[in-house]
Amino acid sequence: MEVELISINHAILGLLSHKPMTGYDLKKLIQESSFLYWSGNNNQIYKALVELLNAGFVTNEVRHQDSSPSKKIYTVTSAGLAELRKWVAAPPEPPEFKKTFLIQLAWADLLNPDELNALLAGYEQEVRTQLLLLKGQAGSDHDVNEGKGITLWKLIHSNLISTYNNELTWLAELRHELGLT
């Protein structure tokens, strides 16, 4: 029986493929990641871990500690690695470019030039803020990987940065075309 998994489950399998971790370790890595876009809240992670455990894709071991609460350490199984490999080899989904801003912009002709400038400035500031945050995260995703994985994660990070830079270039072109420069 094949278990349908959502992407967070595959991300967790991927993280566990590098080393066994606790739910807390997974939460911290997901929250610090520049491209693992889930909130990393406990409900999502522990629900996914239960699903993965029930599917036989991970096991857990309780480690008792003298001065701290016990920890559950999760480890990916060979079935989990096979599922991860199958998912990684599957055809990729088409890229998503859903941006609420574009929907707002579609009716921006309702705004006067000052309001339109304010809208564009606000969006540009948000893009710049996200770009700065992303640049500040440089290297945080690399802690999970070793070897060739580091190169892949660096290039993923580079892709995200180029996306934000492209958005800034597009905003400049938009302003120019609308005569707002």
Image (cartoon, rainbow, N blue to C red):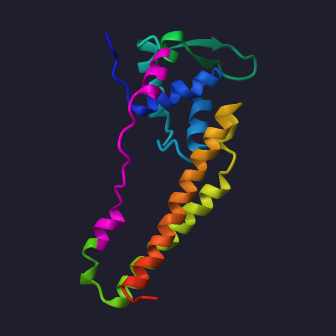
Say which of 153 and 137 sits in front.
153
> Please, which residue is most extreme toward the right here?
67
Q: Is residue 94 above or below residue 46?
A: below
The spot of residue 142 in percent (x, y) is 68, 39
Query: Is any atom of residue 50 visible in this view?
Result: no
Query: Is any atom of residue 14 visible in this view?
Result: yes
Q: Residue at x 59, y 22 (%)?
A: 17
Q: Residue at x 55, y 27 (%)?
A: 14
Relative to 38, 3 lies left or right: left
Residue interval drawn in magenta: 82-105
The spot of residue 15 in percent (x, y) is 58, 28
The spot of residue 132 in percent (x, y) is 62, 62
Relative to 41, 148 lies left or right: right
Quadrant of the drawing holding the N terminus: top left
Query: What is the count of numbered marks?
Result: 0
Q: Quadrant of residue 22?
A: top right
Say which of 134 and 68 sits in front.
134
Relative to 40, 24 lies left or right: right
Q: Is residue 169 above or below residue 179?
A: above
Relative to 147, 17 lies left or right: left
Q: Is residue 18 above or below residue 112?
A: above
Q: Residue at x 41, y 20 (%)?
A: 51
Q: Quadrant of residue 92?
A: top left
The spot of residue 145 in percent (x, y) is 67, 32
Q: Residue at x 54, y 12 (%)?
A: 77
Is 174 within the magenta?
no
